[in-house]
Amino acid sequence: MIFDFKKEYKELYMPKKEPEIITVPTMNYIAVRGKGNPNEKDGVYQQTISVLYAVAYTLKMSYKGEYKIDRFFEYVVPPLEGFWWQNNVEGVDYSNKDNFHWISVIRLPDFVKETDFNWAVETAAKKKKIDCSSAEFITVHEGLCIQIMHIGPFDDEPATVAIMDEYIKSNGFENDITDKRLHHEIYLSDPRKAMPAKWKTVIRHPIRKVK
């Protein structure tokens, strides 16, 4: 059976529609950094996604070629995720999408080492004939967080975040969003196939106990 991260780690990818507190383990990712409006047609963000998936599928299909990854097993490519922020803005200003900064990521299986990643970046660039040099191998330590399943368009997220904020306040926690601990989204729906009202997005924020 092909390993599916969403099914094996439901606590990370399939939260409830109510807030819940979770300790997120350390994970490795393919990452590309960028800035600007993610909705811009053929913009930087769309190019970023192309690079991420080119590298991700090169790793996934590596077992069919000459390059062998130690301890490899077949798996479903995990969903697209994103860490987002805006300079000098508290929270998120959805009216100014041009001011978004992001680190777009796709989770890597633990058996993928940095040498395997470097091979995949070089191989993907040759096969897809695109520049994959922006791709990075990063490790993220999220730790204590609050998360929730948001249903609907991205522009409706503030109402969901308000529910999260009220929950942590009522339970003795506070947000701990910094330049190293960021607003995190996991995209479970394909916007090309689903209506915006049905989009499923995991929203995750770092928190800390109030002293």
Image: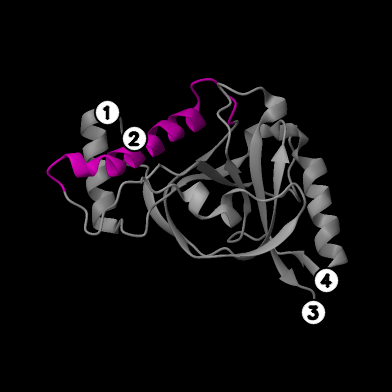
- 68 or 94, nearer to the observer: 68
Residue 128's mark? 1
Q: Badge 2 local density, few (<14 within 10 Å), some, or many (20+)?
A: many
- 28 or 195, nearer to the observer: 195
Of mark 1 and mark 3, the one earlier in the sequence is 1
Q: Are marks 1 and 2 in contact (CB under 8 Å)?
A: yes
Marks 3 and 2, Cα distance to the nearest angstrom? Answer: 45 Å
Q: Which residues are magenta?
A: 38-67
**Secondary structure of the residue carrying numbered label 2:** helix
Marks 2 and 4, Cα distance to the nearest angstrom? Answer: 43 Å
Residue 172's mark? 4
Q: Residue at x 71, y 70 (%)?
A: 208
Residue 54's mark? 2
| Residue 83, image x, y percentages | 57, 48
Residue 211's mark? 3
Q: Main secondary structure of the magenta part?
A: helix
Q: Is residue 4 magenta?
A: no
**Secondary structure of the residue carrying numbered label 4:** loop
Q: Are marks 1 and 3 in contact (CB under 8 Å)?
A: no
What type is the residue that disc 2 sits on? Ala
